[in-house]
């Protein structure tokens, strides 16, 4: 049996006297969309910081395709909470940034990115600056910059949290359609239960700090998931109950 794309076993992390992660174990299979939900301050983003090397693990194991992560650095494409677009670079040059950082020439990076603009709903906006785009278009540009790096796995940290409710709902459905088409391997951090249920194959719910996994919810509903359904609503309700009463 092939190893999981990502496997976290017994992660523990403290900042000074504050214990943030007590015991985090989870896995993500190749081509799977997995979300992590939990109360504010539970340490959801700390998990991504550990994966990207922004902070160091106290104890536990992190494996990517069965290999300890310490010997497989720079294997993730990371999309932070904000779009993080550079205001002085045109959209075409924002989307090539990750490739340029890897050493690809700007000309070659543009040639790789330009064919994807239509699929991401950005055709005709290549020469625009970020300030000239809507919030949803900026997030699509940020996701394009992320996926074009062709890393084994995407890490998404509440990518739509700053958008208004309507734009957020539109972006969630757009991402669901894009994921169905491409089957990226994704770990999503979110506080939005509906978003997690719409997008995910599995959802891990964390306790309050110090965080541990209190429940794992499979979402056994075929993709793409269009509109509300009784099955989706039932899963949402069960997750909300778990978040409100995690130790029951």
Image (tube, rainbow, N blue to C red):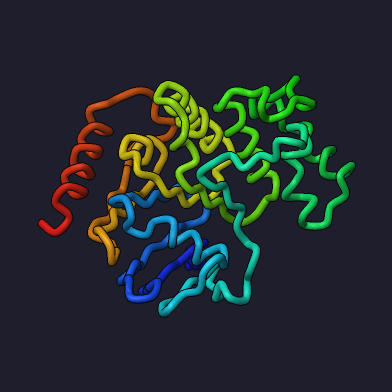
Rendered residue at 55%/27% (across/down): 136
**Residue 196 x/y as whole percent:** 36, 41
Q: Is residue 100 visible?
A: yes
Farthest residue to the bottom: give it: 59
Q: Is residue 88 above or below residue 74?
A: above
Rendered residue at 41%/77% (across/down): 60
**Residue 150 x/y as whole percent:** 68, 50
Q: Quadrant of residue 106?
A: top right
Q: Quadrant of residue 132?
A: top right
Rendered residue at 72%/50% (across/down): 98
**Residue 34 x/y as whole percent:** 42, 50
Q: Is residue 13 visible?
A: no
Q: Is residue 23 above or below residue 170?
A: below
**Residue 162 x/y as whole percent:** 46, 35
Please give the count of numbered marks on the rendered protein: 0
Rendered residue at 36%/74% (across/down): 10
Q: Is residue 131 above or below residue 87?
A: above
Residue 237 or residue 129, whichever sits in front? 129
């Amino acid at each position: 049996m092939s190893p999981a794309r990502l496997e976290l076993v017994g992660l523990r992390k403290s900042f000074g006297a504050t214990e943030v992660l007590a015991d985090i174990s989870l896995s993500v299979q190749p081509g799977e969309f997995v979300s992590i939900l939990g109360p504010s301050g539970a340490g959801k983003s700390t998990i991504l910081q550990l994966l990207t090397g922004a902070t160091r693990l106290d104890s536990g194991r992190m494996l990517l395709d069965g290999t300890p992560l310490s010997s497989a650095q720079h294997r993730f494409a990371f999309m932070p909470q904000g779009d993080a677009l550079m205001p002085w670079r045109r959209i075409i040059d924002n989307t090539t940034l990750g490739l340029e950082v890897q050493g690809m020439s700007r000309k070659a990076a543009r040639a790789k990115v330009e064919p994807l603009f239509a699929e991401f709903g950005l055709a005709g906006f290549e020469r625009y600056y970020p300030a000239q785009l809507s919030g949803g278009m900026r997030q699509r540009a940020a996701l394009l910059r992320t996926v074009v790096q062709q890393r084994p796995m995407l890490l998404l940290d509440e990518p739509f949290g700053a958008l208004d409710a309507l734009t957020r709902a539109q972006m969630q459905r757009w991402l669901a359609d894009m994921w169905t088409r491409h089957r990226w391997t994704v770990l999503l951090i979110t506080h939005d239960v509906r978003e997690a249920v719409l997008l995910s194959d599995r959802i891990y719910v964390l306790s309050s700090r110090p965080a541990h996994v209190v429940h794992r919810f499979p979402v056994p509903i075929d993709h793409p998931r269009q509109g509300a359904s009784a099955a989706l609503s039932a899963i949402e309700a069960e997750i909300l109950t778990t978040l409100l009463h995690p130790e029951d």
